[in-house]
Image: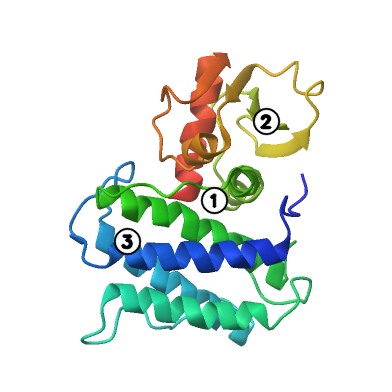
Amino acid sequence: MSGTPLIDHDRLLDVLEHEGTRLASAAAGADHDRPVPGCPGLTLGETARHVGSVYRTVVAWIRSGDRPTSWQRQPDDGQSVEDYVRDGLRSLLGELATHDPAEGCATWHPQQQHYGFWRRRMAHESTVHRIDVQAAGGQDITEVDPEVAVDGVDEVLHLWFTHRLAVLGVAGTRSGTVAVRTADRVWLATLGPRSTSARRVTAAEAESADAVVTADPTELYLWLWGRRAVFDRAVTLDGDLDVSAQLWALLRLATR
């Protein structure tokens, strides 16, 4: 399965800017102690601070050429969390916008050592956590563009299910395959005691899967990120339910 995005890199940079800005706005004036639905133990304020910290981590990573050991992890004295997010976002956008997506730079994926990796990764980091902040604050959830959500499904299956679980040394307890379907796209996730992987396939290639997970792009995106319950009504599970539930549970481990 390729790590090539399903939308262009300029669009991803726009998504990063818009979603980071929305996240900061959602945090402004909200009760930062409110819990984030779907993420036990995480609060609205902690989520916003996390994103502001990640923006700075990425800039430090790019500039140092290696995993950073120090960066500004908390707002300055007197600085609001929303301004901490905005300042970090501004710095990250400036760094990414001045480099071609294909230009090489340090990342945490050995096969994707380029600026395009960070454009995609930070666009979806911002989108998922913007939804977390809005949900925690009891606000209206801004719709995710379907094309962005489909790309997010592709990213979570490639980056987290295929790559991250391997790095963690985590695999399934039983073997099986799951066809993951939304819009006009299909992926085949393979899981078992030895490894996990997912790839883009045709509908015909997915016909023999043990289970099928289907939803509209945004609901599937959020389900794979664990922001929906495993048996949420917005997601249709067919075939072997134990295999589908294992896919969901493994992704919870990968993305937490």
Instruction: Give how far across and how far down residue 58 sits, in percent.
Output: 54, 75
Q: Could you tell which of marks 3 and 1 lies nearer the N-terminus?
A: 3
* Residue that carries the numbered disc 2 in the rendered image: 190
Classify mark 2: residues with Cα within 10 Å, few (<14), some (14-19) or many (20+).
many
Label 3 is placed on what type of residue? Ala
Q: Looking at the picture, which amino acid does disc 1 mark?
A: Leu
Residue 227 against residue 29 in the figure, above or below: above
147 vs 104, left or right, is: left
Between disc 2 and disc 1, whose residue precedes?
1
What residue does disc 3 label? 26
Compared to residue 141, the image places residue 121 above or below, namely below
Instruction: Answer whether labels 3 and 2 touch (C-beta < 8 Å).
Output: no
Residue 190 in sight from this viewpoint? yes
Real-space Cα separation, disc 2 to disc 1, in angstroms? 17 Å
**Residue 168 tag number:** 1
Residue 173: x %, y % from top left: 53, 27
At x 73%, y 59%, the residue is: 8
